[in-house]
Image (cartoon, rainbow, N blue to C red):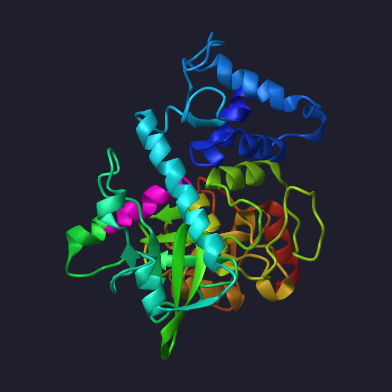
Amino acid sequence: MTILERVKLSFEMLGGVSKLKDIYEVYKKISDETEISKTFDRSIQARIEENSSDSSAFKGEDLFGTVYGKGKGVWYLKSYFPNNEEAKFVYELKNQREEIWNSIKSKKFHSNTFIKSNKIHIGERGIYRDVHNTRKGSFTHGLAVSVLDTGKIYDDVLTESHLTYFYPETKQTTTDLGEINALKATQKYNLPIFVVIGLGKDKSNKEIRLGYVKDHNDIRKNVLIEFRLNKNKVLTNKFDELLEEDEDPPLFTNIKSSKRFTPTRRNNNQPLFNSRVFRYYENKCAVCDIEYSLDAAHIIPVKDKGVDHKHNGLILCKNHHKAFDDCLFKINSNLELEFNNYTKKILRIERNNLSHMRSKPGKKFVEWRYKNYKK
C-alpha cells in the first residue's frame, strides 16, 4: 500500500474529515513500525497538499480539500462530500457532540428533563434526528442525534462495549425509513451519537453513552453500535476489516496474539460477533438455507473460550444451532457434514457439506471442534 493509499484509508476510517493530528495517529495504527520514520507526518502532509487543488503544491489528483483554508490543519476527502460546506458541517457537528459528551460523561445517569432540555433525545421514538438542524444539503433525511434503547424487546444485545439496535417498525413507515437512513448516515461519517439506555422500572433517570454506528444489516434490520470506553478514537468499520484481513486469529481468548488483534474483553460479546459473522457470510443457514430465525453460532464455543472472530462462526437457524451444540451433526476438516444417531432427513438438513458457501469458516476452528466434540 502506498503512502497516498494509506492516507486516503486513514481519512475513511475517520469519516472523511479530520484534523491532521488525527490523520497521523490513524496512519501509525495501520502501518508497520518499519514504515514510520521520524518525519512521517511531513510525508503525509506533503501527499495531501500535492493532491489538493486548494494547495499551491498541487500536482496530482484532486483528492483532498481544506475545511477552513490553508494552514488551519483540517482536511476532508472530496469523494465523501459534494462541497466544503458539508464537510465543515459534519466536522463541526462532531466537535459539538464531543463537547456535549465531555460536559456530561462524569455523571452516568441523567433525568429525562436534562436529556430533553439539552436536546440529546426528544420524544418517545427510538431514533431522534433533529431534522431542523441536521437536514442540510445532501443529508436529505438528516443525521441521527441519538437512539433510545429500552431493552424490552430483544435479549442479549447490550454489552459493556456494544449494542445491537433494531430498526423501528411502526405504522409511520415513511418516518421510520427517514430515521433509519439518518442513523445509517452517521456510520459513513463516523459521527458520534448518544445512546440513551432505559433503566427498567425507573423511568425518571437514564444512562447515557457515546456510541458510533459501526455496521448495518438491512436484511436483519439492525445496526451495530460501539461505545467509546476510553480516550481512544472509535474508527469506522474499514479499520476492523483491515485488521481482520491481516490477522490469523488465536483459537482462544486467553491466548495472546499480535498487538493488532485483541480478542474482546468480554468472552462472549454477542453483538460484535453477530455483526462480524453476518457480514462475512450470506444471511441464511449454512446447512438448510433458511433465511429467518438465524443465529451467529460459535464453532469453538464460548464456554471453551472460543474467540469472537468471524472465522470461528457460522450462520445457523435456531433449530440447527441447537442440533450443532448437541452434536447431532458435526463438520470435518473437509467441511463435510457427519451425523450421529439422527439422519440428515430427520434433522431436515439440506446440505452434505459447506462447499456451497462463498466464505468459509476457519479450518483450524473446525478441526478443533471436530476433535474435541466428536461422539
Would you say the magenta stretch is mainly helix, strand or loop? helix
| Magenta stretch, residue numbers | 179-190
Measuring from the top left, give residue 301's x and y in whole percent.
66, 71
Q: Is residue 184 magenta?
A: yes
Task: Count the marks.
Answer: 0
Residue at image point 52% right, 15% down: 55
Instruction: Please determine whether, in this image, residue 201 is positioned above or below residue 77.
Output: below
Instruction: Please determine whether, in this image, residue 245 is positioned above or below residue 253.
Output: above
Measuring from the top left, give residue 42's x and y in whole percent.
70, 23
Q: Can residue 153 be seen in this view?
A: no
Q: Which residue lies furthest to the top in this view?
A: 59
Instruction: Please determine whether, in this image, residue 7 is positioned above or below residue 223.
Output: above
Q: In this view, does 231 lie to the left or right of 149?
A: right
Picture quadrant where residue 268 is located? bottom right
Foreground residue among 336 and 89: 89
Residue at image point 69% right, 41% down: 246
Measuring from the top left, give residue 195's x and y in whole percent.
45, 67
Q: Is residue 196 left or right of residue 330?
A: left
Foreground residue among 332 and 9: 9
Measuring from the top left, give residue 168's x and y in whole percent.
30, 67
Quarter holding the C terminus is bottom right
Residue at image point 44% right, 87% down: 200
Q: Does the magenta stretch include residue 329?
A: no
Q: Is residue 250 visible?
A: yes
Q: In this view, does 138 lie to the left or right of 30?
A: left
Foreground residue among 25 and 71: 71
Quarter holding the N terminus is top right
Instruction: Please determine whether, in this image, residue 54 is positioned above or below residue 216.
Output: above
